[in-house]
Image: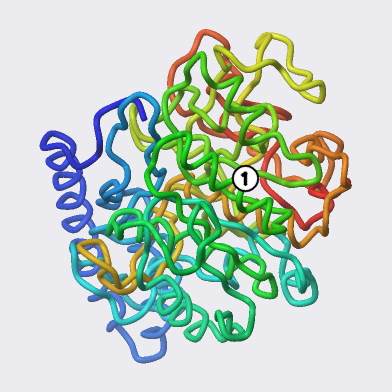
Amino acid sequence: MRTTTPDTPHIRGRWRRAGSAVAATAALLVAGLGTAAHATAATATTAHEVSAKAVAAQVAKAHVQYEKAGCGATPKKGFAACDALRVTGGTTAFMEKQAALKGVTPKTVKPNAASDSPTGYGPSDLQSAYGLTSAASSNGAGETVAIVDAYDDPNAEEDLATYRSYYGLSDCTTDNGCFKKVSQTGSTTSLPSADSGWAGEESLDLDMVSATCPNCNILLVEAKSASDANLGTAVNEAVKLGAKFVSNSYGGAESSSDTSYDTSYYKHAGVAITASAGDEGYGAEYPAGSRYVTAVGGTALKTSSTSRGWTESIWKTSSTEGTGSGCSAYDAKPTWQTDTTCTKRMIADVSAVADPATGVSVYDSYGADGTGWNTYGGTSASSPIIASVYALAGTPGSSDYPAQYPYAAAGTSALNDVTSGSNGSCSTSYFCTAKSGYDGPTGWGTPEGTDAFTG
């Protein structure tokens, strides 16, 4: 990770000021429109619904307050940080949506307080947004999606059960063979030390697999530390144990060692390996820079009146907060990438929701970050979503590198082209700015069904 974290004093102050302004705007709207709503009994319901929608529309323009997960601090050389952001205040897009549907004033997330119900998008939202409702119902049985993270989450299985039970998903437990947790050596008993920050990341990852591919088996591989070598070893163990889909929601600064890491850890023919593009705006990080992985960027996802019912733009909160992208300094360009200005590996390939303001629901009960229902964002959300879409699409060809699959579907209806927004300033426009077709922050776009993720 490259820059100042969102929980430094000057960032916290900026978010508090934004939140206060939003609250004041919402209060004024409620006061003004509430009077109109009581003008006549005949129009009360309609006016109240308009009021709620007007409030939601205003609140939608505001930033939520959030912080980096405890595993997101800038790592030292040779180590990685997670790409997870936890909402601590404000009103999320999901809360706005629910308020508008019910015709009520949107509530807010209370900082560091457990919620008794979700405040972020759930399985039905994500499946709807990405055209996966049918596939999620009928596909994925027998496929295993592996999650690679550092350190142990002692409550991983219990929290996964809570999430799945709330949303009416089938049980996924050690006993029924759906869930398995191992160390980087494959041990089920000798696990790494526990870590609250990484536990939140692990809950996010497990819940996103559950939301996207509820019939899939889940393998959680815990590295003994967040070093590049240990995380890479955990990737190898996931593949050794039979996973054909592996998600990596972490990253760090690029280095000259990346090309050797490529062949040691991420070069697995017949396996779809995804990696988060990063959360600090324009700039490349690793392992998203590996030519053997699918680099996953991040979007802001909101409901709309379009036939799709959803709209997306590049996720950017500020100059240092948004999806990563860029031209790798070290990794060679894979043959399937055809953009011409970047002569090496270009990030990203595809994308999915990552903006904390339009974030996803997660249940986590372990440690300081484990406050029950939370909303998370960051490209830590988008990476396991895309890994799970690959799983819905079926087992990759044994000699394939599935990162190339979306390129075969480029420009087709199998991908939602994201054409608005930017994640920073760059000398080559498409490296950081949305355009029709390929751009760095969102790649070729977001899934519309599974057709872009099969060979």
Say left or right for 5 vs 57: left
Quadrant in which the C terminus appears: top right
Rate crowding at label 1 as few (under 14), some (14 to 19) or many (20 or more) other CA atoms within 10 Å.
many
- Please report the residue visible at 84 percent of the width from the left and 41 percent of the height from the top: 412
Specify the amino acid type for callout 1: Asn
Viewer-closest of 219 and 390: 219
Camera sees residue 135: yes
Say left or right for 285 vs 128: left
Camera sees residue 51: no
Q: Give percent across and percent down for residue 374.
A: 34, 66
Viewer-closest of 299 and 224: 224
Counting the numbered discs, the total is: 1
Q: Which residue is mark 1?
A: 236
Quadrant in which the N terminus appears: top left
Q: Is residue 321 above or below residue 415?
A: above
Q: Label 1's element?
A: helix
Q: Give percent across and percent down for residue 353.
A: 53, 50
Viewer-closest of 2 and 36: 2
- Give the colouring mode of the picture: rainbow
Q: Outermost residue, bottom direction? A: 41
- The quarter of the picture where residue 252 lies is top left
